[in-house]
Amino acid sequence: MITNSATQPALLVLEDGRTFSGSAYGAVGETVGEAVFNTGMTGYQETLTDPSYRHQVVVMTSPHVGNTGWNDEDDESGRIQVSGYVVRDPAIRPSSWRSRRSLESALAEQGVVGIGGIDTRALTRHLRERGAMRVGIFSGPALVDEGSLLERVRSSPEMTGSALADEVSTREPYVVEAKGAKRFTVAAVDLGIKTMTPVRLAERGIEVHVLPATSTIADVKAVAPDGLFFSNGPGDPATAGQQVELLRDALREGLPYFGICFGNQLFGRALGFGTYKLKYGHRGINQPVLDRSTGKVEVTAHNHGFAVEAPLDEVTATPFGAASVSHVCLNDDVVEGLELREPDGPAGGAGRLLGFSVQYHPEAAAGPHDAAYLFDRFVDLLETAGTTTTKENQA
């Protein structure tokens, strides 16, 4: 992989044959992946290191990228996860007291092929009309044989049917200690977990045992958890059969559940709902979502190309309780959250909450933070479950 990108030409090739010419940005060479666009105007370091972007080429709709450089504190994982990066106007130099290197230097150091100087507005409009599709970025020696570039793109794997959680999950369990007095223990299954997520749980007195994606119900029970958490992650939820069975086992055990993003899709599958691929997905930090339980609209951070197929205005009976849609995207009515309750509550009302999930990111580094209350809702769920268990044992 060549890393001297100065003034070298580059070409972006979409699987439908459309091309964009620009300059190499980051590493020089070739890469393929799924082309998706992100509408965030900031937070590019968190985006690039988010494991949910595995095997994706991210197109930034914000025209000027790289102003704040790259620091050593804001990574959401151990490396840049995207397959490629597309920008219109790269910053000439970073300007931030926290910066340790330029964005382009970080991309080059980690071998991430990018392209700059292209019309990202035209590319984004194309993806909105045609949908997310495979794409390749080629620069340096990879440009010698332009005739074969389209075939290399079309022969690359599609996101539909891809099982990627194992690629980004931790290989060994680890513990994030509670901050202050420990209140609860939670088993968090790492499907591509972001660094900030265990931090948000730990801030609320939760000791977080982060477990590999391949964990079984025995592995979960071994940490004696008060609740179970499923993280965000990449790939097609239809391929995650093992994790769905783990979640069903946990629900049978009565473990309170909270899931984010991929964890929402797998919760839907565990409850008997289907999942499907969105035309171009939701990616950015400005997506409006309605929380039906409070009636409030939140501005939220998203990164998902798949969604749960569930009835918006019906309660569905499942083997584990009554399931319903708790959150909805106001742009397109996509399911953005689920909740599971006991079938019957007092006076025929809603029963006790057993588990819930959201499709977006309440940990939201670098923002917005409208949905941070969901971590408090999980604490409330753990408290209620603990009180109920104590009463049942006393009886």
Image (cartoon, rainbow, N blue to C red):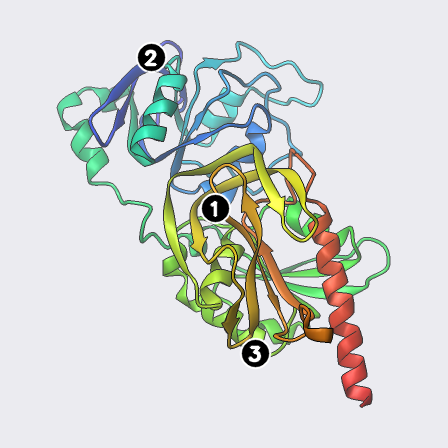
**Residue 8's disc number:** 2
Q: Which residue lies furthest to the bottom in this view?
A: 395
User: Where does label 3 land, which residue?
Assistant: 252
Q: What element carries label 2?
A: loop
Q: Residue at x 65, y 39 (%)?
A: 298
Relative image position of residue 237 (x, y in whole percent): 41, 56
Report the number of discs. 3
Tell me how far mark 3 sits from mark 2, CA to CA.
58 Å
Mark 3 belongs to which amino acid? Answer: Arg
Q: Which residue lies furthest to the front in this view?
A: 347
Q: Which tag is nearer the camera, tag 3 or tag 2? A: 3
**Crowd class of label 2 (few under 14; some 14 to 19; many from 20; radius 10 Å):** some
Residue 53 is left or right of residue 223, and the answer is left
Q: Is mark 3 on a helix, strand or loop?
A: helix
Badge 1 or badge 3: first in the primary sequence: 3
The N terminus, quarter of image: top left
On screen, 346 above or below 165? below
Residue 22 is left or right of residue 382, and the answer is left
> Which of the two residues, 266 or 209, is positioned nearer the viewer here?
266
Tell me how far mark 1 sits from mark 3, CA to CA.
28 Å
On screen, 263 above or below 299? below
Q: Which residue is drawn at 64% across and 72% down?
A: 255
Relative image position of residue 297 (x, y in whole percent): 65, 40
Tell me how far mark 2 sits from mark 1, CA to CA.
42 Å
User: Where does label 1 land, which residue?
Assistant: 334
Mark 1 belongs to which amino acid? Answer: Val
